Amino acid sequence: MVNPLLSHAQHNVVVPDQDVLQQWKTPDNRFGSYEDFLKGFQTQGYRFTFFNEINQPKKQIALRHDIDFDTNFALQSALIESKLGIKATYFFLLRSNFYNILSPQDFENIQFIRKLGHCVSIHFDPSIYEDFHKGLQLEVDLFREIFYLDVNIISLHRPNTFFQELDQPIYGIEHTYQSKYFRDIKYFADSTGVWRFGHPFDSLEFSLQKSLHILIHPIWWMLDEPSSNLDKLKVYFEQRVQALKREFSNNCIPFRKINESL
């Protein structure tokens, strides 16, 4: 059987709307307005789909978000996507030192993202388990118990070469590094705050309207002012420090006496 994702009967180059894409031509503006970034794909005729809906060689995008740091940024990007009629898949860590899916705010954020029509699932770190199949089973059972949702696909957190090349499901569940999502269609990622495989708008695949898999980490897009990835991390770190101090003050009266001196 011929894989439709590998069959390209026509290779007609479509010239993108230059007014929409012009802002992405300078190196210092590669992470500008997230809304304008998404509109760039829409002007090129792309339709955003969930992973299980990718079935065409052209004009489809599986938009993926791995949430490593903050569910508030995830909600911001989800609202922008909803405004544009775009759906995406959000993957959340169940065992994270940065956020807690059971905390009131994080739980509410995830539920809101789901209500906006996006898919929510598990961002799975196999490295913390001796048996990663059993580890995923544990997390899937927990996710179902909390959100009353089945898990049909997961993303892997910082996968090593073994997991990037693992083409089989884990515990019977597909993951985003299987060939049909990671090799058979073009993959772009903004991991570490840089385009590791080039900017999508610069690619031949984008000009040809080929189907794409795009990984976006909202932290690089939802902080407006800093331009570099390092500056964004500095700003975010300070925000987290201040939020932690507020939390300490709200829950520990003695801490209020030293809050201002820290």
Image: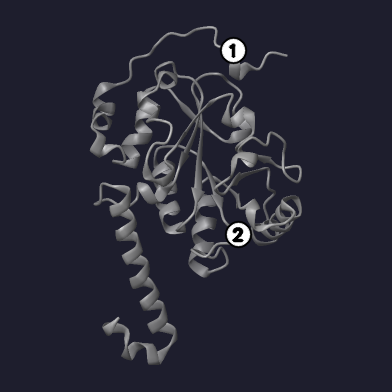
Q: Looking at the picture, which amino acid does disc 1 mark? A: Ser
For the residue carrying disc 1, how many other residues have a C-alpha within 10 Å: few (<14), some (14-19), or many (20+)?
few
**Chain-order first, disc 1 or disc 2:** 1
In the picture, the quarter occupied by the C terminus is: bottom left
Q: State the mark number for residue 107.
A: none
Residue 130 in percent (x, y) is at: 72, 56
Looking at the picture, does residue 5 appear above or below residue 63? above
Residue at mark 1 to residue at mark 2: CA–CA distance: 38 Å
Residue 222 in percent (x, y) is at: 34, 50
Q: Is residue 106 left or right of residue 195?
A: right
Q: Is residue 87 left or right of residue 77?
A: right
Residue furthest to the front: 161
The secondary structure type at the circle numbered 2 is: loop
Residue 146 in percent (x, y) is at: 65, 61
Looking at the picture, does residue 234 appear above or below residue 171? below
Q: Which residue is mark 2?
A: 94
In the picture, the quarter occupied by the N terminus is: top right
The secondary structure type at the circle numbered 1 is: loop
Residue at 34% from the left image edge and 88% from the top image edge: 256
Residue at 37% from the left image edge and 67% from the top image edge: 240
Looking at the picture, does residue 53 appear above or below residue 8? below
Question: Residue 7 lies in what quarter of the image?
Answer: top right
For the residue carrying disc 2, how many other residues have a C-alpha within 10 Å: few (<14), some (14-19), or many (20+)?
some
The total number of labels drawn is 2
Q: Looking at the picture, which amino acid does disc 2 mark? A: Leu
Q: Which residue is mark 1?
A: 7
Q: Is residue 159 left or right of residue 204?
A: right
